[in-house]
Image (cartoon, rainbow, N blue to C red):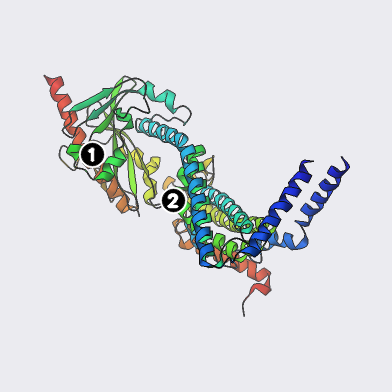
Amino acid sequence: MTTTFFSQTLTAVKSVFRIFDMAINKNSTGYTFIFSILMVVIVGVALAFTSLTLKPLQKKNAADKQMIDILGAIQVITTRTNAKVDFPIYVVERVSLDSEGNVVDSKTGDISATDATDPFNLNVKKDYRSKKPASELIFPLYICEKGGDKIYVIPVVGSGLWGPIWGYIAIESDMHTIYGAKFDHKTETPGLGAEIREDFFTDKFRGKTLNEVNPFFNVLKGGSNTDTHSVDGITGGTITSKGVEEMVNRTLAIYLRYFEKQTNTSAK
Amino acid sequence: MSTENSTATSATSKRESLFSKKNKRLLKDPLGDSNPITIQVLGICSALAITVQLQQAVIMSLSVLFVMIGGNLIVSMLRNLIPDRIRIIVQLVIIASLVIIVDEVLKAYLPDVSEKLSVFVGLIITNCIIMGRLEAFALANKPGPSVLDAIGNGLGYAWILLAVSVVREIFGSGAISMPGMGQVKFLPEGWFISAGGFYENNNLMILPPMALVVVGVIIWIQRSRNKALIES
């Protein structure tokens, strides 16, 4: 029965189209206009619908990815499914700082996706794009505990060759030694600049120390083996490597003020 | 009951005609004698860009296949309605929307794959094969054959991509990668010169020009086997 109904409907639809075909001139300007207007409306609705329905899932994925990257900087490997469970185990406090290194806000416990003041929800990429002076911005800092040690995880954002690059730098409790790093990119060249996300590059940051004065850390063209304040850049990815260096130094300049204040208060 | 049966058989006979000799050629020809990459020389840019690793080539092939089937089907269904003067714009809008939908769906359900694909989504929109098939085939044919044509050309594109990327990855990185498995290095560490061995990966294989050379070798083999393909 259903097949008969289906074929009948099909014939009916076809005959409607045939009448429609004969009735109008498809090469007229009016038809072209109506067709394009209809097309734009339909495509617009379809794309808006797809985007809106998938937005919550995409946001959740982005938050999971952020947790994976933060944990990756302190050398904790986790998966998308476990990120939500693992994150609170290691990240004990989320702090937001002003550009002078003063604590603005501090959060512990669960992350609320709707709470805009939560340092986890601060959009550092958007802040970077806005090109506002640092004094107008708020900087998030994640304080982690691993094996009894305090580790500070700092988000960094900058520009590569083709588009944005970002990542996390983990600093040990001596506020001087790099515990680990994690970088990612949007559109760097595969095989060249894109290699900054690979372990062979980020592993080189481990155990290196920060210089006393700016530049605190260098990404060099070779010759870094004897230097504790620098790593080798990526061959063929010079501009991306320079971008990593720039974003690390620019961001550290702000967070080192916070570290300085911490050492001063503990010394008193 | 009896009417249902009779319509069912007529439906199957119609479906069988979908795989007639002529339609089978739509599937088979693009794999060989009218291959979009080696014979028509379309879609070369993406063949250069994403054949460094097999897993990228697999993901790219699947996405292109999906966009081609979707695009060919939609354009073929609308072929009597699309005004001639803006048909290229209509085709572009359809391809671009499909690619955006693929991208959004991947971002939501397969975020890891989406990260790998991010750079190449734009390349799908500009892939000349898709536009070429819409213009040359879907605009003048019924939905059934159009879908077959899309599958044939998509697979013809895919096998070249896979072949080139296998060669480049084995000789360039000494490894093979599949989506979901990551890169598997199968050469023993001791073989490499850095570890005192005799072997070194060929870095030239990773650079784009080598993709052209590998495609060239495939074209050479193809034309020496079928002399009819050689232009005078």
> Residue B144: which quarter of the image?
bottom right
Instruction: Label 1, secondary structure: give it.
Output: helix
On residue B85, the disc is: none
Residue B225 located left or right of residue A187: right
Q: Position of residue B194 (x, y in %)?
A: 42, 47
Is residue B194 in view? yes
Question: Is residue A181 positioned above or below A29 on the image?
Answer: above
Is residue B127 in view? no
Distance, label 2 to label 1, CA atoms, is 27 Å
Nearest the camera: B200 or B144? B144
Nearest the camera: B71 or B8? B8
> Residue A99: which quarter of the image?
top left
Identify the residue at horizontal 26%, vertical 48% (top origin).
A220
Residue B116 located left or right of residue A159: right
Residue at label 2? B119
Residue A151 located left or right of residue B188: left
Identify the residue at horizontal 73%, vertical 53% (top origin).
A11
Farthest residue, direction right: B2
Identify the residue at horizontal 63%, vertical 63% (top origin).
A23
Q: Where is residue B161 in the image (x, y as percent from the top left)?
A: 56, 56
Residue at label 1? A251
Question: Is residue A182 positioned above or below B120 on the image?
Answer: above
Q: Position of residue A215 (x, y in %)?
A: 19, 43
Question: Is residue B89 positioned above or below A224 on the image?
Answer: below
Marks 2, 1 in one chain:
no
Asked if disc 2 and disc 1 are in contact, CB closer than 8 Å, the reply is: no
